[in-house]
Image: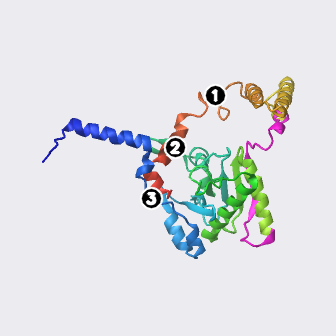
Amino acid sequence: MLTYKCDIVCVIQFLSVISLFRAIVGYDYYYDQKPLFLTPYLKAGNITQAQQLAQTNVGGRISYSGYFTTDEDCGNHLFQWFFPADNDSDSAPMILWLNGGPGSTSLYGLFTEIGPWNHLKSSGFVENKFAWTKDHNVLFADQPVGTGFSFTEKDCYPTNITEVTRNMYTALVQFFQMFPNLQKRRFFIAGESFASHYNLELAVKIHKENQVGTNLNINLVGILVGNGILDLGCNDASDLLYELGIIDDEQRSQLKETNKQVRQAIEDKNYTKAMQLYDHRFYNRLPSEYNVLYDEAVPRVLFDYTLYIKDIKTRELIHV
């Protein structure tokens, strides 16, 4: 009979091989939790059960997360994470938050912009003193399909804004079915950058569907657009900056001339030149257009959340 004696060196070598294997195939190889699909519970009328299954506690806060199926034939599933308002959640307005990209996860907005936490440190969550979730019920959605934790089973990625809007509207209807107490709240669609396209199209879709009356009525009262990208050829802030007293006559003339050159470069399909002109004039090659005090485009600390949400324990908490 053959025997093999393994000393501490052997153990270390074995663990090293395991670590290398994990690095190559990824931790998903060991991750067997199934996504929480909420749609079947809603279809069966099991609203309370859906709420109970979606409820989670992250950072000492009760929230609700899971997937709404938006196309059963394609297997399209949109990930949503809902945070009830800290103050007076029973009457607080409702906000849907979308990041842009296209393809930027709304968890960026959650963890670095308007959510309950500014960012993460090794010691834990850092509270956001200006969080929208203090006085508003906020739903963060990963969309279009393929963004963040949202996925499709049959490569049915949207190819136009109509498909994107249909998926998001379908998910939104299910959200209000799951939380009927929020259906009559004042509802706002908010987002930044390319999400301005999503906001406007979804608002039009809601308005039309409310008129038809085939689905539940969504009490849409407004949209919020931050640094919206609607038409690059029309993005001209020179007059606004002048009226605010930020630039003088000469600088306004310089910006208008740059805008003219940018538009021409776009028409010529010379997008590299357009971006170089835009970047040089508006940002003067500063590392960050969001905050001139940053010494890098986006401080590393703001992306610590990505490591957190990739962790298996976190993914289990938020049902992905």
Judge whether residue 88 can be spotted in this image: no
- Kindly identify which residue carries mark 3: 33
Q: Residue furthest front?
A: 1
Q: Residue furthest top?
A: 250
In the rendered structure, the answer to whether residue 28 lies left or right of residue 286 reads left
Q: Are marks 3 and 1 in contact (CB under 8 Å)?
A: no
In the rendered structure, the answer to whether residue 116 lies left or right of residue 19 reads right
Q: Amino acid at mark 1?
A: Pro
On whether residue 313 falls in the magenta region, the answer is no
Dot 2, crowdedness within 10 Å: few (<14), some or many (≥20)? few
The spot of residue 314 in percent (x, y) is 46, 52
The spot of residue 113 in percent (x, y) is 61, 45
The spot of residue 309 in percent (x, y) is 50, 48
Location of residue 84 (image quadrant): bottom right
The mark nearer the N terminus, 1 or 2, is: 1
Q: Amino acid at mark 2?
A: Thr
Q: Distance between the Cα atoms at labels 3 and 1?
A: 40 Å
Location of residue 220 (image quadrant): bottom right
- Kindly identify which residue carries mark 1: 287
The residue nearer to you, when weighing 86 against 156, is: 156
Location of residue 295 (image quadrant): top right
The residue at 56%/34% (across/down) is: 299
Give residue 74's mark: none
The residue at 58%/68% (across/down) is: 39
Q: Distance between the Cα atoms at labels 2 and 3?
A: 19 Å
The magenta span reads: 211-240
Which one is closest to the eye, mark 2 or mark 3? 3
The residue nearer to you, when weighing 41 against 247, is: 41
- Kindly identify which residue carries mark 2: 306
Judge whether residue 288 can be spotted in this image: yes
Q: Amino acid at mark 3?
A: Gln
Dot 1, crowdedness within 10 Å: few (<14), some or many (≥20)? some
